[in-house]
Image (cartoon, grey):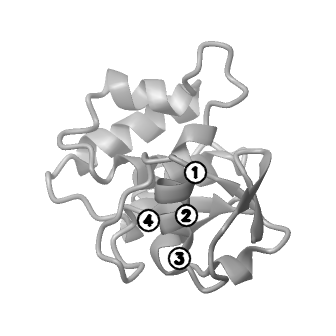
Amino acid sequence: MVELTVNGVRRSVEAEPDTPLLYVLRNDLGLTATRFGCGAGLCGACFVLVDSTPMASCDLPLWSLTGAAITTVEGLAADEPNGISALQQAFLDEQAAQCGYCVSGMLITASALLARGQTPGEEEVRSALDRNLCRCGTHNRIVRAVLRAAKR
C-alpha cells in the first residue's frame, strides 16, 4: 500500500514502490489527462507538479513521492468556481491544442511558470516550455495562450 497526496486528496493505492507514478494516476486513480509519451521522461506529455515543480511521471517511482504534493492537470482548476483555470481558458481561446496530446504537460509546465507570480515575456515562456515537445506545431499558439493567461 502506497499513500499519495494527489490534487489535494490523500489517496491509498495498491502498488509496488517502484511503480511509475503515471501508471497509478491513469490506471488506479482514473486521472487520464496525464499522457504517456516517450516513457523516458523526455517529451513532457506526462508532466505533473510535484511540490510545484514539473516532473515526468512516466519514470518517477512511487517511493520517491513520500510526503509530496502531486498536482495533475485535473487539479489545476480545483479551486476555480467554474471548473477551469485562466490558463486552461487561454489555451481554449488561442486554440492551442491541435491533437491535444502534449497539452496536459504544457499546462503543467506553464502553470508552474505562472505560479512564480511574475509576468513572463515570450522568451521566458519559450524557455520554460523547451522540455515539452509538440509534434503538431502549435507552439506559437501555446506561447500566446500562456502570455494571455499571464495578463489575467
Query: CB of mark 2 within 8 Å of CB of mark 3?
Result: yes
Instruction: Give the SS element for disc 1.
Output: loop
Which mark's residue is nearer the viewer, 4 or 1? 1
How many residues crowd mark 3 within 10 Å: few (<14), some (14–19), many (20+)? many
The residue that appears at 37% across and 61% down in the rendered structure is: 45
In the rendered structure, which disc, 1 or 3, sits on the residue that comes first in sequence?
Answer: 3
In the rendered structure, which disc, 4 or 3, sits on the residue that comes first in sequence?
Answer: 3
Query: CB of mark 1 within 8 Å of CB of mark 3?
Result: no
Query: CB of mark 4 within 8 Å of CB of mark 3?
Result: no
How far is disc 1 from disc 3 in space, using C-alphas? 13 Å
Q: Quadrant of the C terminus?
A: top right
**Mark 1 residue type:** Leu
Instruction: Give the SS element for disc 3.
Output: loop
The residue beneath circle 2 is 24
In the rendered structure, which disc, 4 or 1, sits on the residue that comes first in sequence?
Answer: 1
How many residues crowd mark 4 within 10 Å: few (<14), some (14–19), many (20+)? few
The residue beneath circle 3 is 20
How far is disc 4 from disc 1 in space, using C-alphas? 32 Å
In the rendered structure, which disc, 1 or 2, sits on the residue that comes first in sequence?
Answer: 2
The residue beneath circle 4 is 127
Residue 98, position as x, y percentages in the image = 18, 39
How far is disc 2 from disc 4 in space, using C-alphas? 30 Å
Q: Is residue 17 left or right of residue 86?
A: right
Instruction: Please indicate, yes or no, whether residue 122 appears anywhere in the rendered image.
Output: no
In the rendered structure, which disc, 2 or 4, sits on the residue that comes first in sequence?
Answer: 2
Residue 56, position as x, y percentages in the image = 50, 72
